[in-house]
Image: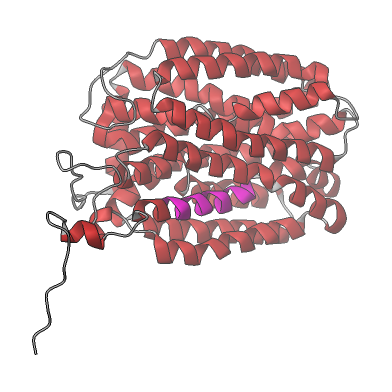
Amino acid sequence: MTSSPTLRAPGQDPARAARPRVHRAWWVALAGFVAMVGSAGFRSVPGVLIDPLHEEFGWSHGTIGAAVSINLVLFGLFSPFAAALMDRFGIRPVLTVALVLLASGSGLTVLMTEVWQLWLLWGLVVGVGAGSISMAFIATLVNRWFVARRGLVSGVLTAAGATGQLVFLPAVAWLATHHGWRVPALVVAGTALLVLPLVLLVVRDHPHELGLEAYGATEGEPTQPRAARSGNAATMALSGLVEAARTRTFWLLAGGFAVCGASTNGLVGTHFVPAAHDHGMPLTAAAGLLAVIGIVDIVGTIGSGFLTDRVDPRILLAVYYTLRGLSLMALPALFGPDVQPSMWAFIIFYGLDWVATVPPTVALCQQHFGDRAPVVFGWVFASHQVGAAVAATGAGLVRDTHGSYDFAWLGAGALCLVATALSLLVPRVRLRTGLAGQPLGG
């Protein structure tokens, strides 16, 4: 007996009928989201533990801030090399190694007794691991797996990194207060390891490995399989920098993003808790405020991704930097032993703008640099982390010299207004926001 052929509606595509109802790109994005949250955990620890480490080892705020600076610089500088490594070996292997480095660097800190060990573990090991799961990773994943909704997905993944860094803070502060600073370091190490199985099971390098097109690709605009790369990853990353550095757009984006890093991770992320503590606020309360920034940031960054698909990203950047600068200038007057309504207003307002700059910056890199966008954005993000490192050390020195962080807040606010001008000077391109094409110059 012969079986009857499977019936289907006239004109129905068999391949389309076999496709899952939820495109695999969304599952890969979900795994990327969890990886970003997990990798961000350890980066939340230094800001909360500045005072406990100062009390146990006698290290100054500037010394501890220098360790954070090493972490921030390597976090940024390794990002373009991580993008090149993902291009050479694939996304999943790089993520796996990065999570192991994060877990190792976090766990081994419990054994440190000298300041050079602090710099080695918080700086080198965690900096390289975190730099592999950073904004260049977002650009790589979005470029390969999405054609439509790139701005939205960039916003969601960016929110994962920023939110993961901040929502851990209350738990870290509570554990440090009641059980010492070593316990939260071990907890974060375990969290990084828990993310590994999800990455190994779900993440794939390119949709064509599964016989799929990227999400939103049309018949007239299919995505091409990733070409095999045989070159050295370092050479690929450096050549991307050389090519991008010949354009004015790169320097404008890098300059603005350096200010972004200085006014977020470097200053607020590292020094908000000790600054609030200087005014009599308990560590747990100050850490809770930063956690609220992380929660509010989800709305702000996803909303920014939504707007980036519809509004000129240069205008968005100008608005974000202006509002951030004005809010930072007002912050010194808001500190006190208790959390007043004015401080809540700052936290919510500033939280909406925490990393809202990332989706429009990614979009501008895609518009101007096409297939090179992930590596180029990696270098733009490196400038973000250099700015953060300068602010982390500089604000600590300001505190050691003047006994207050006031000048640091005011200086960061003024720099944000400079970033506004830089954003408006980025050349306009005639390309639908969020779609990467061939390099368009600038």
**Eyeballing the image, is 289 above or below 46?**
above
**Eyeballing the image, is 1 above or below 76?**
below
In which quadrant is the N terminus drawn? bottom left
Whole-percent x and y of residue 7?
A: 16, 68
Type of colouring:
secondary structure
Please state which of residues 49 and 194 is positioned toward the viewer in this rendering.
Answer: 194
In which quadrant of the rendered view does residue 266 lie? top right
Whole-percent x and y of residue 347?
A: 72, 28
Q: Residue at x 29, y 26 (%)?
A: 367
**Eyeballing the image, is 323 above or below 439?**
above
In which quadrant is the C terminus drawn? top left
Q: Is residue 417 magenta?
A: no
Is residue 383 in view from this perspective?
Answer: no
Q: Residue at x 39, y 18 (%)?
A: 312
Please state which of residues 146 and 116 is positioned toward the viewer in this rendering.
Answer: 146
Is residue 17 in view from this perspective?
Answer: yes
Q: Tell me the magenta residue range.
A: 29-43
267 vs 364, left or right, is right
Q: Most prominent secondary structure in the magenta stretch?
A: helix
204 vs 50, left or right, is left
Q: Residue at x 65, y 61 (%)?
A: 107
12 vs 143, left or right, is left
Q: Residue at x 63, y 63 (%)?
A: 190
Whole-percent x and y of residue 341?
A: 83, 24
